[in-house]
Image (cartoon, rainbow, N blue to C red):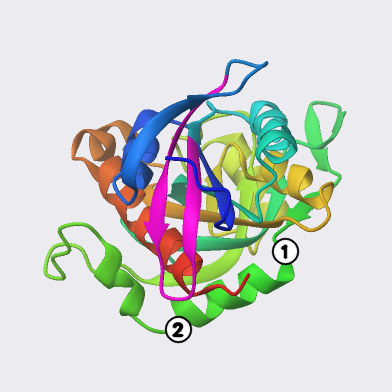
Amino acid sequence: MKNDTLPRAVILTAIPVEFKAVRAHLYSPNEEEHPTKGDVYDRGLFYGERNNWDILVAEVGAGNTMCCLETERAIEHFNPSVVIFVGIAGGIKDVTYGDVVVADKAYGYEIGKIVKGDMLARPDLGKSTYGILQRAKAIARNDDWKKRIIDYDPEKNDPIAITKPIAAGEKVIASTRSPIFRHIKKNYSDTVAVEMEGYGFYKAIESNEGVQGLIVRGISDLLDNKEETDQKGYQALASKNASAFAFEVLSKIRI
């Protein structure tokens, strides 16, 4: 459902479980295709506290490069006021299953130099935009956002939300004993979660002045025993919680 009188937001996801969790918040969604690139979005309405929104949701696949490209395409074609990446992540510290991490910055942890088999970090990062991050911080300070969690049951799912850095690379990290995990802990010690798209997403946001951008991640695993936790449904839980937080941001942000 297209409405050119409303402020517009694009929400990007990487995998189907994330996409479905976001789509569940839209009123009357319909499919819409990019006229030249072939990207397929779902478009619907969201009724917020301060603004109603024209929302487009896409599943862009994994990886920083693809996410950067798809973010640029979406901004160029749809001219949104806000772009949010909603998805899951693996927790490193200070979080547990279902918690929500709002990324104030995303490190590209695979940027560096190999010397005698060792990785020497050359840190680079992307950042969220100021205004939407401040709104997210205010929302994280209380529990009102949890009311947007679909089928919310605080006895089974009572997440916290924090604003912290994340790290993004091109690999799925499934062990706290892996060299990549040790590399992140050594060189990006303030990182609380890892994923695969955030660095590329924030780089695209930085190159488009006037567009507000934010990453919201739900914690679906703690790296070790990832396959087991995935089978228990934590990806869906984490996606549901991250989506609820993202829509609370849209509900209360001023445009």
Percent across and percent down for residue 160 are: 36, 71
**In the displayed structure, would residue 68 be above or below residue 135?**
above
**Quarter location, residue 88:** top left
Query: Is residue 43 located in the magenta-colored stretch of the structure?
Result: yes
The span shown in magenta is: 39-57
Amino acid type, residue under disc 1 in the picture: Thr
Q: Label 2: which residue? A: 141
Residue sitting at 39 percent across and 56 percent down?
Answer: 46
89 vs 168, left or right, is: left
Residue at 21 percent of width and 40 percent of height: 233
Instruction: Decide if residue 93 is in sight here.
Output: no
Q: Is residue 113 left or right of residue 141?
A: right
Mark 1 neighbour class, 10 Å CA radius: few under 14, some 14 to 19, many 20 or more: many
Ranked by sequence position, the earlier of labels 2 and 1 is 1
Q: Secondary structure at mark 2?
A: loop
Q: Position of residue 180 (x, y in %)?
A: 62, 37
* Residue in front for this viewpoint, 168 or 206: 206
Foreground of the two, 216 or 99: 216
Q: Tell whether 59 sits left or right of 198.
A: left
* Residue bearing mark 1: 129
Indicate the position of residue 132 as horizontal and vertical percent values.
Answer: 63, 69
Between label 2 and label 1, give the one nearer the viewer. 1
- Classify mark 1: helix, strand or loop: loop
Q: At 13% across and 65% down in the image, what residue appears?
A: 153
